[in-house]
Each structure stands twice: as C-alpha cells, then as structure tokens.
Image (tube, helix red, strand yellow):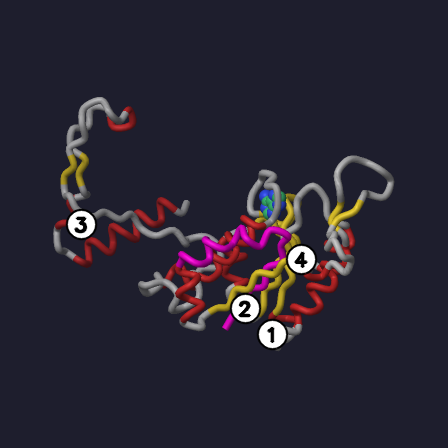
C-alpha cells in the first residue's frame, strides 16, 4: 500500500477534496493512505511561527527550515520502507515538469512525502538537503504547492490497480510516457440536434452524429478504428 504524506500550512484545503473523491474510497479499501500534516505542529515556539525575514533583506517572509526538517524526519518513520521506495517531493514552479511518466514512477513507490511551500519563499536548504526532487505541475506560478499535491495524488492513485471502477486500459497502465489518452467515447443519443446558431464551432452542422462504425456491431472493426484514433490523438 502506497502512503502519501502531505505537509502544508493550510491543511484544510484538502478536506473536501479527499473526502468526496475516489481517493476516499481507495483509502477505505486500504489501497492507499493519505495523511495531511499541519506544518505548524513542528514549530516549537508558542506562536507556531513557520516563517521569518529573509537574510540579506528583501520583501516578504521565508518559510523556515527547522519545522520542515523535523516534520520530514518524523513522517519518514511512519512507513517502513527503503530509501529507493521513498521520495520526498518539494513543489515549486522551477522544478522538474510533472508528466504521466512521473505519475507512473511515483505509483511504484511505497512512501511519498510532499512538502507544500508557499511559493513566495522557502529556505533554499529545503530543496538542497531535504527534498529528493523538486516538481512543477506546469509553467505557471501558484500560491503554493497544495494544488500540485492533489494533482500528484490523484494522477498517481488512479494508476494503482483496483482504484478506478473499471479495468485499466492495457496501454495506460504499462505506458510510461505517451499513449495514455483513452479513445474517443460516445453515448446516447445517436443523433443530437442542436438549436440553430448556438454553437459557432458547429455552424452548419444540423445533426451531431455518433460515428457509424460504433453502431455497426462489428467488434473487430471497432477495435481497429479505436486503435487508429488513439494513435492520432497521441501524436
Ligand atoms: N508552487 C507554485 N507554483 C507551482 C507549480 N507550478 N508547480 C508546483 N508547485 C508550485
């Protein structure tokens, strides 16, 4: 069972998300464990201060090293595993880009510890001495790593057999990089008649139809068609 530990100064951010999603079901089925930790718990002073002024001057505050150091050391002990099967991730926009391949690699681990810094500043020694890897979920700047942590848990967890309600596509589970996008899907109605002029993208198309091949009942042809479309999508 893979264990995710998330360290944050805004632990409430995760409440509803992890409660209502498949992640909750997966936890009940003991397929994964997700635990959110309030970083302030490891701040020793009576006000639970986790940031301080930057050395050398400048605006804003910097997240302190010691609470994160203590948190990570304590959390490491929560799961018995090897160094190879554990990763300590720091979220930052300058980090390595997060891809499906990264999700795949993470899904093979035993223990994932995630540090959500507030982006404005985190003592550089966290990246240098504590984190195994810095990850970015995209080329934009968020206010902190909390959304990134949710992205990583969700995209990783769904690769673990038994978590989704359907069998995984062979290609998806085994493909380490590209080729993870499913084929095109349709459901009823077979023909949809949009109201005229409501959709500029479909101007002039009166009937939005499901491709005929899918209605043919010829499973071999359907499989071929899907494989072909999949190739096109994943190019
Ligand atoms: N923190 C701030 N921006 C981020 C990003 N794009 N990815 C991961 N963590 C972040």
The residue carrying mark 3 is 214
Neighbor class of circle 2 (other Cα within 10 Å; few <14, some 14-19, many 20+) is: many
User: On residue 3, which mark appears?
Assistant: 2
Front disc: 3 or 1: 1
Provide the residue designation for mark 4.
39
Is residue 150 shown in magenta?
no
Magenta region: which residues?
Answer: 1-21
Tell me the distance, in whole angstroms, between the alpha carbons under discs 4 and 3. 53 Å
Pointers 4 and 3 in contact (C-beta within 8 Å): no
State the SS at label 2. Answer: strand
- Residue 122 position within the rendered picture, expressed as x and y whole percent measured from the top left: 73, 48
Position of 94 with respect to 35 (left or right) is: right
Find numbered disc 3 in the image and state the secondary structure of the residue it sits on.
helix
Query: Is residue 163 rendered to the left or right of residue 78?
Result: left
Residue 2 placed where, x, y %?
Answer: 52, 69
Gap in Å between the C-alphas at discs 2 and 1?
7 Å
- Quadrant of the rendered image containing residue 130: bottom right
**Tag 3: Cα neighbours inside 10 Å, few (<14), some, or many (≥20)?**
some
């Amino acid at each position: 069972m893979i264990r995710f530990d998330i360290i944050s100064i805004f632990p409430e951010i995760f409440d509803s998300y992890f409660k209502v999603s498949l992640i909750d079901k997966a936890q009940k089925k003991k397929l994964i464990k997700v635990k959110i930790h309030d970083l302030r718990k490891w701040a020793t002073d009576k006000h639970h201060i986790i940031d301080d002024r930057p050395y050398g001057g400048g605006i804003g505050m910097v997240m302190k090293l010691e609470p994160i150091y203590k948190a990570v050391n304590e959390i490491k002990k929560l799961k018995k595993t090897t160094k190879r099967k554990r990763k300590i991730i720091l979220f930052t926009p300058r980090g390595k880009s997060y891809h499906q391949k990264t999700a795949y690699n993470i899904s093979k681990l035993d223990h994932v510890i995630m540090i959500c810094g507030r982006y404005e500043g985190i003592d550089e020694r966290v990246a240098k001495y504590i984190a195994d890897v810095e990850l970015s979920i995209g080329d934009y700047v968020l206010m902190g790593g909390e959304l990134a942590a949710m992205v990583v848990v969700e995209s990783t967890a769904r690769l673990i057999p038994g978590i989704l309600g359907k069998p995984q596509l062979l290609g998806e589970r085994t493909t380490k990089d590209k080729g993870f996008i499913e084929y095109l899907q349709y459901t009823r109605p077979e023909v949809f008649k949009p109201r005229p002029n409501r959709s500029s993208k479909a101007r002039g198309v009166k009937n939005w139809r499901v491709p005929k091949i899918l209605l043919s009942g010829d499973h071999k042809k359907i499989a071929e068609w899907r494989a072909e479309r999949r190739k096109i999508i994943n190019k």
